[in-house]
Image (cartoon, rainbow, N blue to C red):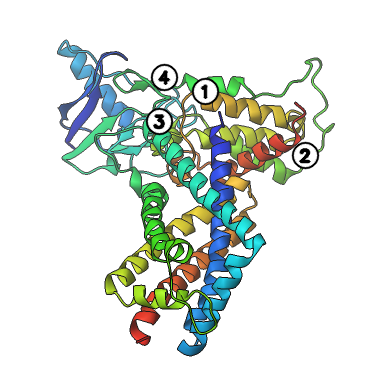
Amino acid sequence: MLSTLSKKILMCLTGLFLAFFLLIHFLGNLQLFLPQEQAHLQFNAYSHFLSGNILIKIVSYVLYLSIVLHAIDGLVITIKNKKTGGDYQSDQRGRASKWYSRNMGILGTLILIFLVIHFQNFWYVYKFGAPPLDAKGNKDLYVLVIAVFQQWWYVLIYVLSMVALCYHLIHGIHSAVRTLGLYHPKFVHWFKVIGTTYSIVISIGFALMPIYIFFTVN
Amino acid sequence: MNLHLKIWRQKDNQTAGKLVAYDLQDLNPHMSFLEMLDSLNEKLIVSGEEPVEFDHDCREGICGQCGVMINGIAHGPLKHTTTCQLHLRSFNDNDTIVIEPFRSSAFPVKKDLKVDRSAFDRIISQGGFVSINTGQAPDATVIPISHELAEEAFDSAACIGCGACVATCKNGSAALFTSAKITHMALLPQGKEERNQRVLNMIKQMDAESFGHCSNTEACEVECPQGISVLNIARMNFEYNRALIFKKR
């Protein structure tokens, strides 16, 4: 049986890996902002390169494992915390902390639901469906992206999910650094600033992709 | 001033409790919160009722014995004070005040507002000490310790073990308390000798007492009477990770 601290370390390591993955995912997806003709072929070639690379394949399995472990560990921690925490008839304890730091489980669940939708939209169709081919013979992921983001409710789901992601990341990165044991006040402050900036940039950047496509691509 | 109180009354650990309303008139606003409870108890005794039981000792804010949830906040509305250092002037005339015991699964209610906090003692007994052979007192300058380090260790040692951190934590986590003790010892040269075993033993005991996980909401620091920093928790995590890597068995 893992100790309470060990369970937090697992949460921290899988979380940091996922947060790092987001950066790579984000940088790759920036290609969607290129002029449409160029974006079309380049994005598909990039997807093809990723799906054919053995290293990326290994990383992708680490990614799936991290998502599963992060979710299960989070559930185990949340259930235990619900049991051990006190209940009060009159409860004003919220004044002492941020709402998103108290509701990481709910934010995480929203992100998990989003991930199911997101995987179903692209990952599943790309891997197991029969997507069309582009001019260079690569699977045409770009038209899938365009098709999804021309539906306003998908744009809305994606943007709202990025809000949940942003708050989850802000507390998650801060908390992960704490779990690793960084105790120097100066560097704790730096990492808080860096982590918050990272969370906001990544989330706004991702949210802009469906919005950009919805309003520019025909 | 007049106050409407709703106080948690519970006969013993086996019986379910409930909030009971009491009204007090003509209170002096400069009374401490505990003196107000004393005056309530005097009235209850005179009228033949069971007085409200609550923990208290020094009433100077340094022993850590008193502590109740006042309107859902540990030690009441003031920050960084104990319940005994709270005065009625912090409330308004005719306020309704809900008073409940500190709650968590590791703090069973003994009676009324009294809870069993001996889980803290058992954590301390697992590592809140330095193993030395006693004899003549050594010269104070034998082990040089800088002023800054001594102060830093003392900041952690200032924890009075009242349990407000656990009561405030939505998870009922004892991370702040345990980490303050671990940090206090880990900072000083005498404590460094046993640092690996200490942190492992104390965390093991903390988990055995059914405290929750720390989720770094940092509410504990805000409500702590001594303002113990959450960076102690970071230090505890550091010590724990370090011990996992370097432990010999």
Name the subunit of mark 3: A
Which residue type carries mark 2? Ile
Quarter in which the N terminus of chain A is drawn: top right
Which residue type carries mark 3? Thr
Q: Is residue B4 left or right of residue A71?
A: left
Q: Is residue A22 visible?
A: yes
Q: Which mark is residue B227?
A: none
The residue under label 1 is B208
Whether marks 1 and 3 lie on the same chain: no
Q: Mark 4 Cα within 10 Å, few/some/many (few <14, many 20+)?
A: some
Q: In the depicted view, which residue is nearer to us: B230 or A43?
A: A43
Q: In the depicted view, which residue is nearer to us: A25 or A125?
A: A125
Mark 4 or mark 2: which comes first in sequence? 4
Q: Mark 3 Cα within 10 Å, few/some/many (few <14, many 20+)?
A: many
Q: Secondary structure at mark 1?
A: helix
Which residue type carries mark 1? Ala
The residue under label 2 is B145
| Residue A63, picture quadrant | bottom right
Q: Secondary structure at mark 4?
A: loop
Q: Position of residue B193 (x, y in %)?
A: 77, 30
> In the rendered structure, are the residues bearing label 1 and label 2 in contact, judged by CB atoms less than 8 Å apart?
no
Q: In the depicted view, which residue is nearer to us: A12 or A145?
A: A145
The residue under label 4 is B116
